[in-house]
Image (cartoon, rainbow, N blue to C red):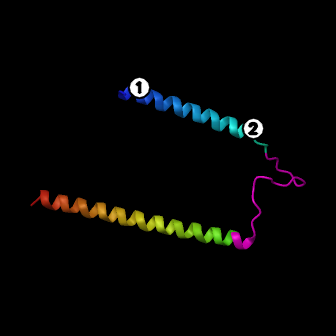
Amino acid sequence: MPLGESMITVLRNNRLLAKRRKNKFEQQEEIHYSKDKKFKKFPKASPELLKKIRKKLRKERWILLEKTIIWFSVVAFMILLVLKTVFQ
């Protein structure tokens, strides 16, 4: 399959997926924010559960930050090695 045909196929599939998602969300009930109506789509969460979720999110952020710093340091080291070999 040539590149042009595959790109057209991908675009067509993406458009169909977007339509399906739009229809899916249109079929769901709308959430009205009022005092007397309860939310149906959100699970009930206790304060302890929310604290656990916050801790997990913080931990994941730190892990992501550490990985990013490591990758940048590795890339910087590789660039320095290349520059060192070029200018010798």
User: x, y percentage for residue 44?
Assistant: 77, 63
Residue at x-position 67% and y-position 72%: 51
Residue at x-position 65% and y-position 72%: 52
**Mark 1 belongs to which amino acid?**
Glu
Q: Quadrant of the C terminus?
A: bottom left
The range drawn in magenta is: 31-49
Q: CA distance from mark 1 to mark 2?
A: 33 Å
The image quarter in which residue 48 lies: bottom right
On whether residue 47 falls in the magenta region, the answer is: yes
Instruction: Look at mark 2 in the image and give the residue it sits on.
Output: 27
Q: Classify mark 1: helix, strand or loop.
A: helix
Residue 20: mark in rendering: none
**Mark 2 belongs to which amino acid?**
Gln
Instruction: Look at mark 1 in the image and give the residue it sits on.
Output: 5
- Name the main secondary structure of what is drawn in magenta: loop
Q: Are marks 1 and 2 in contact (CB under 8 Å)?
A: no
User: x, y percentage for residue 62?
Assistant: 49, 69
Residue at x-position 52% and y-position 65%: 61
User: x, y percentage for residue 55?
Assistant: 60, 71
The vertical placement of 12 against 28, above or below, is: above
User: x, y percentage for residue 43?
Assistant: 75, 59
Instruction: Looking at this view, name the residue that lies furthest to the front.
Output: 1
Direction from residue 48 to residue 73 in the image, left or right:
left
